[in-house]
Image (cartoon, rainbow, N blue to C red):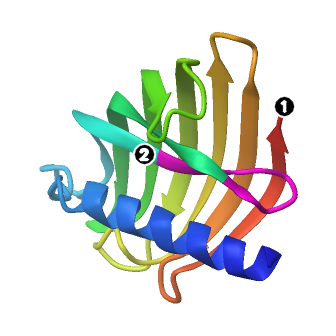
Amino acid sequence: MKTKTCLLLCLFLGIGLIQISGQFVIPPPPDNKTQTGSIPVTMPYEYWIPIFLEDGSYLDDLVGPGTLHMVFKYHNGKLITMDYTWKSDELRFVNGTSDEVFKVMDVGKQVAYTNDALTGFSVFRVNIIGNQGTRYKVDGTLDWETFTYTWENIIWK
């Protein structure tokens, strides 16, 4: 059951990440002699994350408006990494699990193999805090080549 639940979670997050990735264009390398440096991009977005409990059971989805800030780092014209932070103060349960309002900080780094943000792998940490004291934390990695997630340290209390 845990394996099925984890696979379902990966599918949902993958869909969400693909939707977000389709909303921005990867900026070109810096316009300097070595094409080395950083390009920041900030944009509004609709944050979404499915919530699974420590035993692997699905609880509900959290959604809400937020901001995505990315910094694309180039070296000699090649995209090396993309650091990102997703923030929202207005996440709510889709199916009405509770009336609690959550804020999220989702921080990660993506290592790119090419000048395409959908290659390489991402390492991330998600922290969600509710206005009634609920806390959710998960660490993970995503291999963009195989679209495989690895989850660690899931805490919901």
Residue at the disc numbered 2? 48
Amino acid marked by disc 1: Lys
Q: Is residue 27 above or below residue 117?
A: above
Neighbour class for label 2 at 10 Å: few (<14), some, many (≥20)? many
Residue 115, above or below 36: below
Indicate whether 118 appears above or below 157: below
* Front residue (pair 135, 119): 135
Q: Is residue 42 visible?
A: no
Of all residues, the one furthest to the bottom in this rendering is 146
Question: Type of residue at label 2?
Answer: Trp
Q: Which residues are magenta?
A: 49-58
At x 19%, y 50%, the residue is 30
Tell which of 156 and 93 is nearer to you.
93
Please check the rendered image and state whether residue 51 is part of the magenta-colored stretch, yes or no: yes
Asked whether residue 113 is drawn in magenta, I would say no
Along the viewing direction, whichever of 137 and 57 lies nearer the viewer: 57
Q: Which residue is mark 1?
A: 157
